[in-house]
Amino acid sequence: MRTQLLCTFSIRDRLEDILELIIECNDILYDKVYVFQNLSEPNQMICTYNVMYEDDYIADDIPNTISLHRKKQTNTLYSINALNEVIRDLNGGVLDKRFPVPWEEYKNSLLLTNDAGLNKIPTKLHKIIDTKNFGEV
């Protein structure tokens, strides 16, 4: 059994519906979903949560969901492709897995790639959802 950090994107108006779907479709470790706000686009919300899986695990297909990694010390969320792009950008185009990444430069951000290359999205923790008590009034 291994853990995987998943990230589901939502717009603010659909956040409660997306959280309900995430909780319904996954066994969430630690019973927490962390919701971040995209500071560049305040209407975009970023939900992160850990799940357990085995090699034959097939996740329920939740739209707008990707696998991520996290650098805890700087609260940096990133895809492997984005990390490789950071290394190439800083190391003269060479991908060297031993290259030291200056994580402080990416503090409180989400690193993704798109057609233009590296996309650094500034984030702020919006709220932490306790999945055991979600939906209770």
Image (spheres, rainbow, N blue to C red):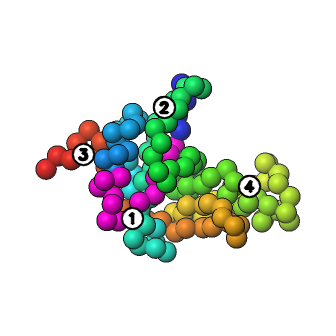
Q: Classify the position of the N terminus by image quarter.
A: top right
Identity, as a three-letter code, of the amino acid under mark 1: Ile
Q: Which residue is mark 4?
A: 84
Q: Which residue is mark 2?
A: 52
Q: Earlier in the sequence, mark 4 or mark 3?
A: 4
For mark 1, give the secondary structure. Answer: strand
Q: Earlier in the sequence, mark 1 or mark 3?
A: 1
Q: Earlier in the sequence, mark 4 or mark 2?
A: 2
For mark 4, give the secondary structure. Answer: helix
- Mark 2 → mark 1, Cα distance in angstroms: 26 Å
Residue 81 colored magenta? no
Residue 15 colored magenta? yes
x and y, in percent, of residue 73 in the image: 54, 53
- Mark 1 → mark 3, Cα distance in angstroms: 19 Å
Q: Which residue is mark 3?
A: 134
x and y, in percent, of residue 50 in the image: 46, 40
Region of the chain picked out in magenta, as a range: 5-18
Badge 2 vs badge 1, beta-carbon distance below 8 Å: no
Residue 11 badge:
1
Badge 3 vs badge 2, beta-carbon distance below 8 Å: no
1 vs 3, front mark: 1
Q: Earlier in the sequence, mark 3 or mark 2?
A: 2
Q: Residue at x 21, y 47 (%)?
A: 135
Residue 38 badge:
none
Q: Residue at x 17, y 46 (%)?
A: 136
4 vs 1, front mark: 1
For mark 3, give the secondary structure. Answer: loop
